[in-house]
Structure formats: C-alpha cells, structure tokens
Amino acid sequence: MKLSKTAEYALRIMNYMAIDEQKLYTTTELFENLNIPFRYLRKLMIKLSKSEILTSVQGKHGGYRIARKSLEISLLEIIHATGEDPVGNVCFFGFEKCAFVEKCAIHEKWTLVRDNINQVLSKTTLAEIKGSESTSFIKNNISILT
Amino acid sequence: MKLSKTAEYALRIMNYMAIDEQKLYTTTELFENLNIPFRYLRKLMIKLSKSEILTSVQGKHGGYRIARKSLEISLLEIIHATGEDPVGNVCFFGFEKCAFVEKCAIHEKWTLVRDNINQVLSKTTLAEIKGSESTSFIKNNISILT
DNA sequence: TTCAAATAACACCTAAAGGTATTATTAATG
DNA sequence: CATTAATAATACCTTTAGGTGTTATTTGAA
Ligand code: SF4
Ligand code: SF4
C-alpha cells in the first residue's frame, strides 16, 4: 500500500505544522525539514490553503498556519484535501459494473481490506500522530533550493 | 486501495483462464470476455508468458495455457508477474530512511494495514477465487477490435 | 515610498503508466 | 510449399502525476 507522492507530502506537511498550531510556517522552513521539491511544495501549499485545513497569510512575514481544528481532522481528510481518494469502492478486478452474475470469492475479502484502510485513515487524527520538537525530522538528504 | 490497471488485467486473465486449466485460450477469446484493450492485452500476455504462470503456444491453433500449478499460486504472485509490488515496505510518509528519531505513532498502525493487504493477497490462491462457466463474465461494454 | 520577503497565478517540462501500430515469426493444414 | 491464424518483437503515441520556471501580488518595515 503506497500512497501517492502528493498525499505523502501533504501528510508530512500537516504532521510537521501540527507541532505548533500557533506558528506561521514559511514554505522555506517546510522545505528545509520535509524534503519535498521546493516549487512543488509551493504549489501544494496553495492547494491545501484552499481546502480549510490550513490558512495562508500573504506579504512579508507571511506563511501558513494550520487551521484551528485541524488537529482533530483525520488523515483521510488530509489526503482528500489533495483531491485524491486512496480507498475507493471499486471492484477487485477493476470492472466498472460487477462482471459476475454472483459475487466472486474475493469480493468480501477485498471489502474487508478496504474497510481496514478506511478505518485507520479515517479514525486516526492528526493529533494522535503529530511529531514534536524532540522527535523532529532528520534531514536525510541534502536539500538544495531550485 | 486500487491496484494498477495492469495488475487488475492480469488478475482478470488468470481468473478467467483458471476456469479450464487444460484449455488453450487465444488472445481474442480473452479480449471478448475481459474487456481489456486488445493490443495492450497482447503485450501483457507476452509478459505473463515469460513469468512461469502461463505458457504460450505459437503458430496456428496456438494460444496460452495456464501453468500446471498456477491454481495454487497466490494473487500476490500474479501481481508480481506484472512487475509490480502493491504492498511495499515503505514509510507512511514516504521517507526513504526513517525520518524520526523514534517511531512515530502511525508507524505500527500502518504496518498492520500493509500486513493485512499482504495476508489477503499472499494467502488467497487462484483456486479459491476462480470463476466457473456458470459465473462467467457479463460483457458490460461493447468490445471493438482496434 | 521604496524595498524586501513572503504567497498567488500561470504556463511549461519530464517520466511513467497505459495504450496503439506495424512488422516478424511460428506452425498447422490444404 | 503457400496460406492462414496464431504469438513475438519493436517502436511509437497519449494521458497523467510529478516537478520547474517566470512573473504578479501582497504587506511589513526601513
Ligand atoms: S463480485 Fe467480484 S467481479 Fe463483482 S464487484 Fe466484487 S470483486 Fe468485482
Ligand atoms: S516511524 Fe514514522 S517516519 Fe519513521 S518509517 Fe515509520 S512511519 Fe515513517
């Protein structure tokens, strides 16, 4: 189970910003800590700021601040803010309409798998997983502004 | 949880061919029943035939036959035959190396999700899910040879 | 009132998955 | 031995996710 890069990035961002919900974070600070391509990060921040989970402040000394109640939102909602749906409600074989006359033997099993994913993502809140200063990220890679 | 199109196609193919493990199936027959783009299907069949889960017979009256023990292989192995790995063993946030000093709160939960997917895909055999003549596919869409 | 430091907007580029097209090869059969 | 019906091989096209580049706008402060 791999989430899309974009979803992973959004989760990194929110997880990091949740450390201090008062603070205004600049894209540069996020870039230096989260190892996300700089310009892609900017684009993503703009997208996320349009979706109620964080707000932007323009101008000098501007930045982004996590929305008040973002700590109580689920990981699934964060992913949804990127415009994706990692769970879906699709056929195991990818058929548009069920192709079998009767349900095939994998149908229920697969439904349980999807339910499991859905549960974890929709019941886990940002507050539960957020990092802290002491568990801050290790910069694995050299980050260079492009 | 959506598998890739290619993985879904491979599963459709194997599931269908498992109905009669003796039979030699032509690409045309598969195309007419599985709603997979014709030329993409051909390419995929060649790929699958190189991976021990099915064998090809060339020439007139040729086709593909499911490998003897394919009924006992897992769904995961079928997906692997397409060159993909739907489970992975990656960080929830997509970090290459773990970015936290200590494991974050989502790590274990996400490991369980991946384990669940892995269990279902690796423990379910083709024999368990295979269709039969009576539960054959309904052709939802008009299929046109291109 | 100008400068600097931030976000916003828009357009473009790249890589990978998915899908097509064409030609070559194989082998049964009249 | 030519025909035909199948797979094999190779190359190319299309769409989309991911990533870059450039210019405009906002706003605090020298
Ligand atoms: S019964 Fe089988 S074919 Fe039908 S929707 Fe479920 S998984 Fe797909
Ligand atoms: S502990 Fe957290 S950051 Fe580290 S590998 Fe696990 S999910 Fe990723």
Image (cartoon, coloured by chain):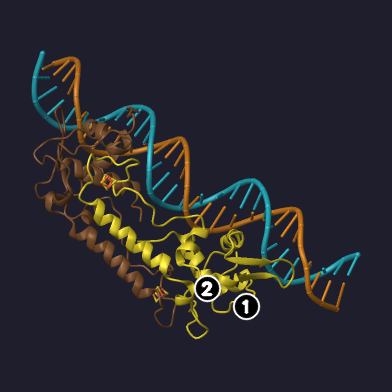
Chain colours: A brown, B yellow, C orange, D cyan
Q: Is residue B137 above or below residue B63?
A: below
Which image quarter is the C terminus of chain A in? top left
Quadrant of residue B114 within the rendered picture: bottom left
Q: Is residue B65 above or below residue A15?
A: below
How far from the left and from the top, in percent, is residue B9?
Answer: 50, 65
Q: Is residue A75 above or below residue B97?
A: below
How far from the left and from the top, in percent, is residue B63?
Answer: 66, 70
Residue bearing mark 2:
B71
Residue bearing mark 1:
B22
Q: Residue at x 46, y 66 (%)?
A: B75
How far from the left and from the top, in percent, is residue A60?
Answer: 15, 27
Q: Amino acid at mark 1?
A: Gln
Q: Do dots 2 and 1 share one subunit?
A: yes
The residue marked by circle 1 belongs to what chain?
B
How far from the left and from the top, in percent, is residue B25?
Answer: 62, 73
Q: Amino acid at mark 2?
A: Leu
| Local SS, label 2 | helix
The residue marked by circle 2 belongs to what chain?
B
Query: Looking at the image, which is closer to me, B64 or B33?
Result: B64
| Local SS, label 1 | loop
Quadrant of residue B45 within the rendered picture: bottom right
**Residue B143 is at least partly visible in this image:** no
Which image quarter is the N terminus of chain A in? bottom left
